[in-house]
């Protein structure tokens, strides 16, 4: 998966690494959310908790103070 290392290290894929970094970030966060649910079903509560926490990192790619 392209840019996965960057996502795992920083919590997002920056636009410095990839012009469409926000899109990659949201995709990986969604994947983590789904992984959390699967881990829960499998009884892997620690894995589920970690994946769910990572799934919230998409917020790191948004600058709330940015002007449009």
Image (cartoon, grey):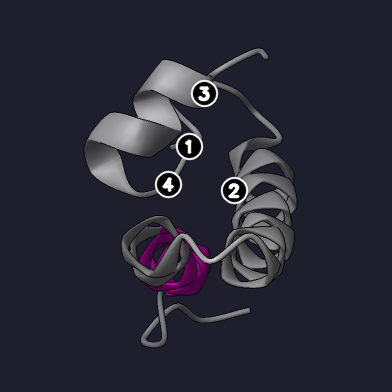
Tags 2 and 1 touching, CB below 8 Å = yes
Please check the rendered image and state whether residue 57 is part of the magenta-colored stretch, yes or no: yes
* Residue receiving disc 4: 12
Tag nearer the camera, 3 or 1: 3
Query: Of helix, strand and loop, which one carries label 4?
Result: loop
Check the picture and name the quadrant holding the N terminus.
top right
Work out whether mark 4 precedes mark 3 in sequence or the reverse, and give the earlier one. Answer: 3
* Residue receiving disc 2: 25
Q: Residue at horizontal 42%, vertical 35%?
A: 7
Tags 3 and 2 touching, CB below 8 Å = no
> Where residue 27 appears, x then y in whole percent?
74, 49
Mark 3 surroundings: few (<14), some (14-19) or many (≥20) residues within 10 A: some
> Where residue 34 appears, x then y in whole percent?
74, 62
Q: In this picture, which residue range is highlighted in magenta? A: 51-60
Give the number of marks.
4
Q: Quadrant of residue 26?
A: bottom right
Q: Nearer the viewer, residue 49 or 28?
A: 49
Give me the C-alpha separation between circle 4 and circle 2: 5 Å
Work out whether mark 2 precedes mark 1 in sequence or the reverse, and give the earlier one. Answer: 1
Tag nearer the camera, 3 or 2: 3
* Residue receiving disc 1: 13
* Residue, far left: 9
Q: Residue at horizontal 71%, vertical 60%?
A: 38
Work out whether mark 4 precedes mark 2 in sequence or the reverse, and give the earlier one. Answer: 4
Query: Of helix, strand and loop, which one carries label 3?
Result: helix
Give me the C-alpha separation between circle 3 and circle 1: 8 Å
Tags 4 and 1 touching, CB below 8 Å = yes
> Where residue 59 appears, x then y in whole percent?
45, 74
Q: Residue at horizontal 65%, vertical 13%?
A: 2
Q: Nearer the viewer, residue 36 or 31?
A: 36
Give me the C-alpha separation between circle 3 and circle 2: 9 Å
């Amino acid at each position: 998966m392209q840019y996965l290392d960057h996502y795992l290290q920083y919590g997002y894929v920056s636009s410095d690494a990839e012009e469409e970094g926000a899109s990659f970030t949201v995709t990986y966060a969604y994947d983590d959310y789904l992984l959390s649910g699967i881990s829960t079903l499998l009884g892997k509560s620690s894995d589920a908790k970690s994946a769910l926490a990572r799934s919230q990192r998409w917020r790191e790619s948004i600058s709330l103070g940015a002007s449009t």
